[in-house]
Image (cartoon, grey):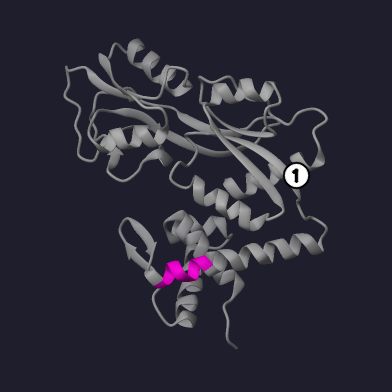
Amino acid sequence: MQGFDLEQLRTLAAVVDAGSLTAAAPRVFLSQSSVSEQIRKLEERAGQSLLTRSKAGVSPTEAGLRLLGYARRILAMSDEAFRDLHGETLEGELHLAVTDYFRPGDLTQLLARLGESYPRVRLHVSILKSDAMRAAYAQDEFDVGLAMNIAGVSAAEPRASAVIRRESLAWLGAAGMKVVRGEPVRLLVLPDTCSLHQFTVALLRRRRVPYVLAHVASGVAGLQSALAAGLGVACLNESAISDGVARLATPHGLPALPRVAFQFMPGRRGETAFVTRAREMLATQLG
């Protein structure tokens, strides 16, 4: 029989998204060996290699990328058909606000997949700083908000809101950069309205670490570019590590950092069933 197995296609997508077979396993509720076997069978059916394996993880081959494009569309249509036949079709207009720090390298792709999975949802997305998002949410300016909270620092969201992802903060710089002890840290930040900017500056002051504000970027993409150019050091969450950017090698003499949680803002009293269901959908798709 010609064609591809749906679960094998789902496994391929999970492996590419996770970056390794081991990391993909819990996403598809399989063991690592089962994931490996699924990929082997899929490559047999495709008649060519779909993944390039290395110590850093896996990446799709040219054939893997081509099949991945088909796989995402097939999976999206399968999921939509299932929801439709079970009376779970989601349809409406949703205004979503997302913090600039949430998976900056993947967000465009994630939103594209949302569009494929829920073609009847008209999605409007705003990228906001978490504090600005909370203020706008209080004014009913959007339906669903995904903010970043710093452990032990940010005001905790009510328990009703879902944590969909946790990450460590890290001191980052250009690959191979070393901090010279005794010299002020050249700090790269977002504007001082950003809660992570405020946290980083307060932490360095409290630990009596000398620093200078070497560059203020308007967004995370600009911060990543400045880091890769070697302009200085920044405190960022793990998923903001990008090409040319790496964790500072230890020992670097900078303070230990907490974790952050990406958390949906709590539902409003009296919100529509559509918004509630959309928040649940987003938690599944973005986590």
Residue at image x 29%, y 34%? 227
Left or right: where 277 falls relative to 153: right
The quadrant in which residue 84 appears is bottom right
Q: Report the magenta residues as a range.
A: 63-69
Q: Nearer the viewer, residue 218 or 246?
A: 218
Identify whether 273 is placed above or below 180: below
Q: How many marks?
A: 1
In percent of width and height, residue 38 lies at 51, 72
Identify whether 17 is placed above or below 232: below
According to the picture, the residue beneath numbered tag 1 turns out to be 277
The quadrant in which residue 277 appears is top right
Q: Quadrant of the C terminus?
A: top right
In percent of width and height, residue 2 lies at 58, 86
Q: Is the magenta region chiefly helix, strand or loop?
A: helix
Residue at image x 52%, y 60%? 14
Residue extending farthest to the bottom is 1
In percent of width and height, residue 179 lies at 20, 27
164 within the magenta span: no
Q: Quadrant of the N terminus?
A: bottom right
The quadrant in which residue 75 appears is bottom right
Q: Secondary structure at mark 1?
A: helix
Q: Nearer the viewer, residue 240 or 90?
A: 90
Left or right: where 285 falls relative to 175: right
